[in-house]
Image (cartoon, helix red, strand yellow):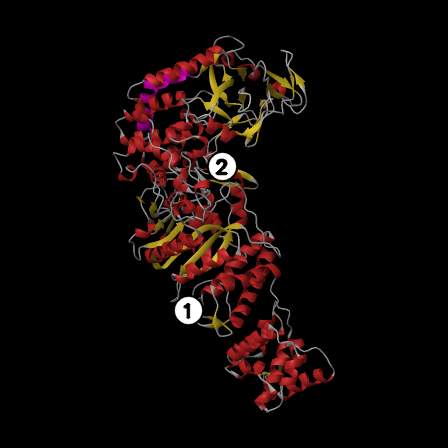
Amino acid sequence: MSKEIGESKEGERKTLPIEKGYPIEQVNDIVDRENQSKRYYRPLYTMHKWWARRLGSVFRTISLYTLIDDPASLSIHDAGSDNQKLGDFLDNQDSLRDLVNNVDLGDPDSLWQLYNKDVRVENKRVLDPFMGGGTSLIEASRFGASVVGNDLNPVAWFVTKKELEAGETDIAELEAAFDQVESQVKEELTDHYSTECPECERTADVMYYLWVTELDCTSCFETISLFKDYRVAKGRYGNKGKYNILCPDCESIFHVDDWRSECECDCGNEFIPAEGPAKGAEYSCTSCGQQYSVMDAGQEQGGYGSRMYAIEYYCPHCDEEGRDRSVYKGYKQAEEVDIEKYENAVEEWQESEGLESYVPSQEVPLGILTDSTAFEGSIGGGHNLLGHGYDEWTDIFDERQLLCLSKLLGAIDDVENQNAKEYLLLALSDSLMFSNTFTIYNRQRHNIEGIFKTNSFKPQKEYVENNVWGTEYGRGTFLKSWKKVLAGVEWAEAPVERYIQDGSTKKTEPFNQPVGENHEVHCGDMRELEYENEFDAVLTDPPYYNNVIYSELSNFFYVWQRLLLKDEYEYFEPDTTPRADSIVANPAEGKDETDFEEELFQSFSKVHQALKQDGVLAFTYHHSDAESWGELLGALCEVGFEVTATYPVTADTNRATYKLNEGESVDFDIIIVARPAQDRQPISWNSLRRNIYRTAQKTRQRLEENRDLSRGDIGVVEMGRCFHEYSKHHGKVERAGDTMTAKDVVDEIYGVIQHGSDIGEIDVFLDLIETPDASFNDLNKLSRGTNATPERMEDMQLYRMDDGFKLGMWDDEKRIAYIQSRLDSDEELTNLDKAQFLRYRWEHGKNVSDYLSKWEITDDLRELCEGLADATGDDTYRNILESRLSDY
């Protein structure tokens, strides 16, 4: 029978706090706020883009509840002091031992008191074989753990390397290196992003140049500007509620109240701003009415043209003079002098010598994200970067961007301090997301969205040319990215933690433990790692099917980073990131879901090998159906793990949606906790089913009574407890003579969670049969919280107390008399009544075939007979359902 995960007994493996409980409510409260203000909570993670990065608060909590298991190796330091231990903490709180030991399913909050404390653990070694953006390593290192990371992708390796090195980096050296680059190129670069202020007629800074793609109509050859509509931006300041609109005739910009209704420009042109010529993948010619595919027309004409049509500017002179915001920040029509400035930049780029070595020369490789039509199979969405004519990486940038970026990269290359050079490169690389022709303008928020607003390469009909160096306002410039780097380094040297107290966000004093004090990171296939019995914990976020094709997306950064890193690190010598060894379902590599599952199985094998026997694997994951969960559970169990807990986790961008209602799939992100499996014991499905029912019911009752959780959250925790019940018997669960697979059991677990457990008299009776020397006290305990009662079971003659406690088996006279009386009065029989009655008649050589032909022989009855045979050792139960009159 099942038992709740709790304190380990002497001689047993230590049960970790994360196996006993997890503070879902507290984490979700912080996560909701961190999601909205990532650069304030953990600026280190905003230094450079990485996809599907888990929030720091999630992995800090996982680390807290995983690494803190021995109070003797735990110390708490006074934040803001000179690394002094916090002696007063224990005087006013429960002992550290109680903080660790008091964590349980109903109340996991005792250890949460340490979330905002500068806590250190001794002698802990942590591995993340899929480190990605490095969140797990950074959070574990903040507890003083020695951390080891690995990733196949060189961009992930470089980003995480700089994050972990930040805690030991000298800010003064970074500032000196930046000053050198600034003095070398700032004036030259910012000159390309200047325009005349329409108010004071002095020089204003260009925040953004707004461009539109053009092509010629295939019918009348009229040039078509591919506007979806003629909105420039939503009104702001004194014009809230209105819209800035571009006149398609004279190209002046003016305000309207309703952009969906007809309006008239001062030039006399009447038009409806909502009606532009671009309609999805097609255009509609404003002259002849021809409708045609944009991509086909572009291919026929050898590419697209583009035209600057507007500018968002910031005038520092008007700002300094105290003028209104609507004066010093605004939109203006692109004038001839602005267009000439761009043409001069194009000419300079074309005539430059040596700058080509500071832009990538590689072609865009064929892949599922660059031309999905070239492969059988799909990952969702149409991807055709190559089909739109973007053959080389430089095609994604305009000439002025290439000119400015190459000059900036050249200046960075002149920096002698390698560490500072790499941080400057990191800032430039991150800014590339916003300095390309796939950047778009967010008309509602008055800022820009980078190339990876979606995890794809999506050519834009309207795009933004960002100010490469940057100005006072604006997003995604080199200057803004550099400030993010400095903020990240400063935080890494003395991290602070934000937490919630009485509904308000509080900030701790700086911690004394820097990030990454004892770390190493590797770049390569994790299946080639040779660690054995070395790590106390593996904390990770492994790849998920085809959710993000990291190898293809990261090439965008890689080809630029490679320019300065190929002579420093061997991982940057190839032209592209490695793809063939990526663990992902990618049709471009001939890999489907089966390949992904096999490679994930191989990965878990390596993790199991690397862990100590008393170690723990805790990882975040996402799945959406029972079959996928069955694959994952089966893979974990097959390599030697047993799942001990699961908890809901908020995703990197939005709160996960939990679907645990009848008829729906389960779709959420979760934390999975697993330990190396101990001896597995054989069990019948009937016995395991009852254990699962009881486990789910106990879990649900405790959570509903003690926690403020949604039904979906409770279902996730239930699922983990049920997985644990199965994990203890993986490969040894028998049903009707067959061994059940993990998928089979997961299907059943889904049913339990979705429909609720239904433990009745028969289940309790079977449990009593399996209980050595069963007593009335055992009956009371087993009945508690079920649909069975001792009184009802006594009425059914399933036990009696004439001479001590005795179960009503098939050979008990009173039990058989009870069944016979129900038969005689035509009352409905339970499956247990039928099974015992047939067993009685079989034993006495009486006919059973009449009853077999009259009763419906259901799967439930068959399973019950199997369960009775397993529980009693009486194989006759297996045979009676197949009996016929001819047997006698």
- Residue 263 screen position, x and y as percent: 67, 18
- Residue 289 screen position, x and y as percent: 61, 24
Specify the amino acid type for callout 2: Thr
Looking at the image, residue 855 lies above or below residue 321? below
How crowded is the residue under tag 1: few (<14 C-alpha within 10 Å), some, or many (20+)? some
Question: Considering depth in this image, is 23 or 435 the residue closer to the camera?
Answer: 435
Residue carrying label 2: 454
Residue 680: mark in rendering: 1
Residue drawn where x is 52% and y is 81% of the image: 872
Q: Is residue 68 visible?
A: no
Q: Is residue 463 shown left or right of residue 839?
A: left
Give me the C-alpha separation between circle 1 and circle 2.
45 Å
Question: Considering depth in this image, is 743 or 690 the residue closer to the camera?
Answer: 743
- Residue 306 screen position, x and y as percent: 48, 21
How crowded is the residue under tag 2: few (<14 C-alpha within 10 Å), some, or many (20+)? few
Q: Is residue 828 shown left or right of residue 762?
A: right
- Residue 866 screen position, x and y as percent: 54, 77
Specify the amino acid type for callout 1: Arg
Q: Nearer the viewer, mark 1 or mark 2?
A: 2
